[in-house]
Amino acid sequence: MANIGKSISIKGDLTGNEDLVIEGRVEGGKIELPGNELTIGANGYVTAEIHAKSVIVIGKVGSSVSATEKIEIQSSGSVHGDVRAPRLIVQEGASLNGSVEMGKEAEKTTASAAPLLARTGTRPAD
């Protein structure tokens, strides 16, 4: 598991093939972890588009989030952007401001976008 510490700030794209914990800031661009879990820690702040297998938000996200398995927003977490995943868990006290797409259609759309995103950095037309 990789870790971006709370004193680290990154601007641009992140891609990888291992689980990632973000305690610092990631701004702009995209975070691509199609086969892995992304955790936005309590001190984490992300404004990059997120595409991962599963996403756990404990800190703050100010962009869209898509996952092929699930998105979990814990009680201290906030997401200000659209979310797309087959399963969504929002704990009491969490904040979610944006559209929500769930179920089989979200799973298909997110899964079909992952290979294209990895190759080109663009999503297919909906």
Image (spheres, rainbow, N blue to C red):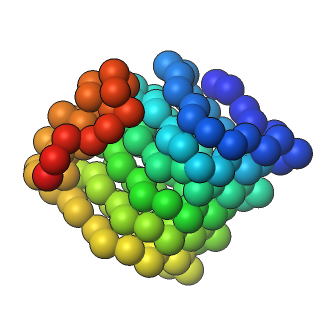
Q: Position of residue 6 (x, y in %)?
A: 83, 47
What residue appears at the point 18 percent right and 34 percent down from the top-left corner?
Answer: 112
Q: Nearer the viewer, residue 78 or 27?
A: 27
- To which quarter of the image does residue 67 belong? top left
Q: Is residue 78 among what the camera can see?
A: yes
Q: Quadrant of residue 13?
A: top right
Q: Nearer the viewer, residue 122 or 118?
A: 122
What residue appears at the point 23 percent right and 63 percent down from the top-left corner?
101
Identify whether 75 is placed above or below 70: below
**Residue 92: where, in percent of width, then height?**
50, 78
Residue name at image x 55 percent, y 64 percent:
62
For image coordinates 44% across by 67% down, the residue present is 81
x then y, percent, for residue 38: 53, 40
- Judge whether 60 appears above or below 126 on screen: below
Q: Is residue 41 left or right of residue 61?
A: right
Examine the rendering and report whether any part of residue 55 can be seen: no
| Number of numbered labels in the structure image | 0
Quadrant where the image shows the N terminus: top right
Left or right of 34, for residue 43? right
Closest to the observer: 120 or 98? 120
Tell me: residue 60, above or below residue 115.
Answer: below
Image x and y of residue 107, in percent: 19, 45
Q: Quadrant of residue 20?
A: top right
